[in-house]
Image (cartoon, rainbow, N blue to C red):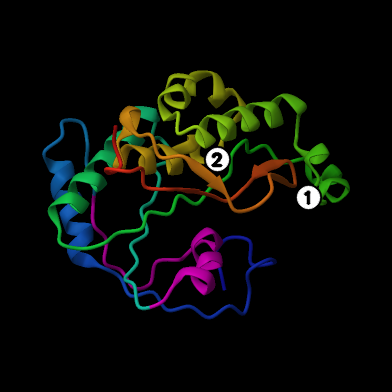
């Protein structure tokens, strides 16, 4: 059972084999960066969120998994720095790595007493039309592999409260090139509502010649 939202994720068994060596490699990269600290945690009793549990049945085979937390006090430069550390750790290790950023686009829930009227997936239930439009602008830029413009527009997009200040995306894109990344995004699902928040599944394909321009 997920520690978060057990109403939606209960009675779901999971077993995740960690990767202490990879976690330590990322932390070592963090030690080389001023104003950055990354702590590798090997505690089998930590709770787990549904954003990770929900993916396991679809993605987990024999792979080892490492969950990277997003600091509640983190800001855009912090998330980019962590992603850069992850990217350098991957480059230094002899292994294939698949990065998953698990989190919403715009992320404002309807008040509890209004929530039941907005549980349908239709886009009309996104908290505001402006939030939905901002989400679509992000998706359109991703489809073109234009990550530089997304990064440039982050201060404006943060007004729509993307989940965890969009740290899941920022760390991921920093790991695969940051502003120089030209990986185009392919949608694997329709853009939809979840009680006011913008949800979609996007995969970034490796460009010819590698991840960066």
Is the C terminus in the top left, top right, bottom left or bottom right quadrant?
A: top left
> In the image, is residue 126 part of the stretch drawn in magenta?
no
The residues bearing labels 1 and 2 have C-alpha atoms spaced at a distance of 18 Å
Comparing 202 with 9, the one in front is 202
Q: How many marks?
A: 2
Lateral position of residue 129 relative to residue 200, left or right: right
| Residue linked to disc 2 | 163
Classify 65 as above or below 128.
Answer: below
- Residue at the image position 75 percent from the left and 34 percent from the top: 127
Residue 174: image x %, image y %?
32, 37
- Residue at the image position 81 percent from the left and 45 percent from the top: 122
**Mark 2 closeness class: few <14, some 14–19, many ≥20 residues within 10 Å:** some
- Residue at the image position 69 percent from the left and 48 percent from the top: 190
Sequence-first disc among 1 and 2:
1
Residue 51: image x %, image y %?
53, 58
Classify 104 as above or below 19.
Answer: above
Dot 2 lies on which element?
helix
**Mark 1 closeness class: few <14, some 14–19, many ≥20 residues within 10 Å:** some
Lateral position of residue 49 relative to residue 208, left or right: right
Residue 206: image x %, image y %?
36, 47
Dot 1 lies on which element?
loop
Is the N terminus in the top left, top right, bottom left or bottom right quadrant?
A: bottom right
Classify 104 as above or below 93.
Answer: above
Residue 135: image x %, image y %?
63, 32
Comparing 178 with 166, the one in front is 178
Image depth: mark 1 or mark 2 in front = 1
| Residue linked to disc 1 | 121
Comparing 205 with 125, the one in front is 205
For residue 54, which numbered disc appears in the image?
Answer: none
Lateral position of residue 137 relative to residue 109, left or right: left
The residues colored magenta run 39-61
């Amino acid at each position: 059972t997920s520690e978060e939202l057990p109403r939606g994720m209960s009675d779901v068994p999971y077993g995740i084999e960690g990767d202490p060596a990879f976690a330590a490699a990322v932390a070592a990269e963090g030690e080389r960066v001023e104003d950055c600290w990354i702590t590798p945690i090997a505690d089998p009793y930590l709770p787990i969120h549904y954003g990770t549990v929900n993916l396991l049945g679809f993605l987990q085979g024999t792979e080892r998994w490492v969950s990277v937390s997003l600091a509640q006090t983190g800001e855009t430069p912090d998330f980019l720095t962590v992603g850069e550390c992850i990217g350098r750790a991957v480059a230094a290790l002899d292994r294939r790595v698949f990065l998953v950023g698990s989190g919403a686009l715009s992320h404002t829930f309807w008040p509890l007493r209004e929530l039941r009227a907005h549980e349908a997936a239709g886009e009309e239930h996104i908290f505001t039309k402006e939030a939905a439009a901002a989400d679509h602008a992000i998706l359109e830029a991703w489809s073109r592999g234009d990550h530089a413009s997304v990064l440039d527009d982050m201060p404006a997009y943060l007004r729509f409260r993307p989940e965890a200040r969009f740290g899941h995306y920022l760390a991921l894109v920093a790991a695969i090139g940051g502003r120089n990344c030209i990986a185009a995004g392919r949608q694997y699902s329709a853009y939809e509502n979840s009680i006011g928040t913008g949800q979609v599944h996007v995969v970034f394909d490796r460009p010819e010649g590698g991840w960066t321009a």
